[in-house]
Amino acid sequence: MSRDAFLVPVTSPEFDRTVASPINLTELPIHMSTLDEIDTPENVRVWGVKNSNLNKKFYGKMTEGDYLFFYHNDHYRYFGRAGHKFESDIVSREYWGDISADMLYTITDFKNIDVSRKALNEVCGYKTNYQPQSIRRTSNKAYRGIRREYNSIEKFVSKPRKEAES
């Protein structure tokens, strides 16, 4: 089954609170039916997007297993897979303060990577200066570019890169 890939900008320290460090959802007043859908709700990484028309479009297309590239300071620093999606304002209120993001998703297979914006833009056929401003699904052409050159998304993110690509 073919998966989609999403580019997710990280512009806030809140990312560290719920993604870089897993959280325990069972300590929050989240409906049991939501927790039942998550493999390990007591040790899970969670991120989300604000409820806007554009974010709804991309969030609606995200499915379990899709690839996630997290972008920060001109590099894609983290990689993972989309897990269970759910809507709740409890996580944002508890961990993110003023950031109101209620369209949430868990993240599996999370790891640190170091892929420069230049390297990803080049293999995807994007303009050199492209950088995601909010969550974006990669184009089919971009996704095929990665698969054509590296055979898989996993091989692309695991490939050691030269300093010149930074």
Image: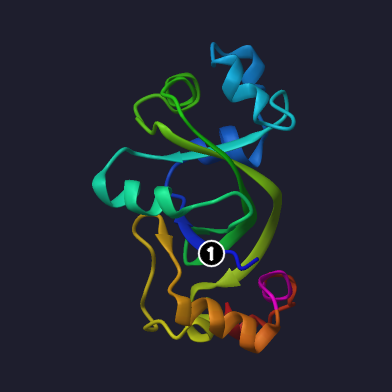
Quarter of the figure with the N terminus: bottom right
Closer to the camera in the image, 56 or 48: 56
The residue lying at 60 percent from left, 15 percent from top is 32
Task: Tell me: residue 126, above or below residue 77.
Answer: below
Give the residues in magenta. 152-156
Place of residue 24 in the rendered image (x, y in percent of width and height, measured from the top left)? 67, 22
Residue 10 painted magenta: no
Neighbourhood count class around disc 1 (C-alpha, 10 Å): few under 14, some 14–19, many 20 upward: many
Quarter of the image with the C terminus in it: bottom right
Q: In the displayed structure, would residue 41 be above or below residue 64?
A: above
| Coloring applied to the structure | rainbow
Q: Which residue is the site of mark 1?
A: 5
Farthest-out residue, front = 1
Q: Quadrant of residue 22?
A: top right
The front one of 49 and 143 is 143
134 with respect to 42 (left or right): left
Give the residue drawn at x 28%, y 52%. 54
- Nearer to the camera, 79 or 53: 53
Residue projecting furthest to the left: 53
Majority secondary structure in the magenta region: helix
Which residue is found at the position 73% from the left and 75% from the top? 155
How many numbered circles are shown?
1
Tag 1: amino acid: Ala
At x 54%, y 64%, the residue is 4
Q: Position of residue 115 (x, y in %)?
A: 60, 71
Residue 71, x across and y down, in percent: 50, 59
At mark 1, the secondary structure is strand
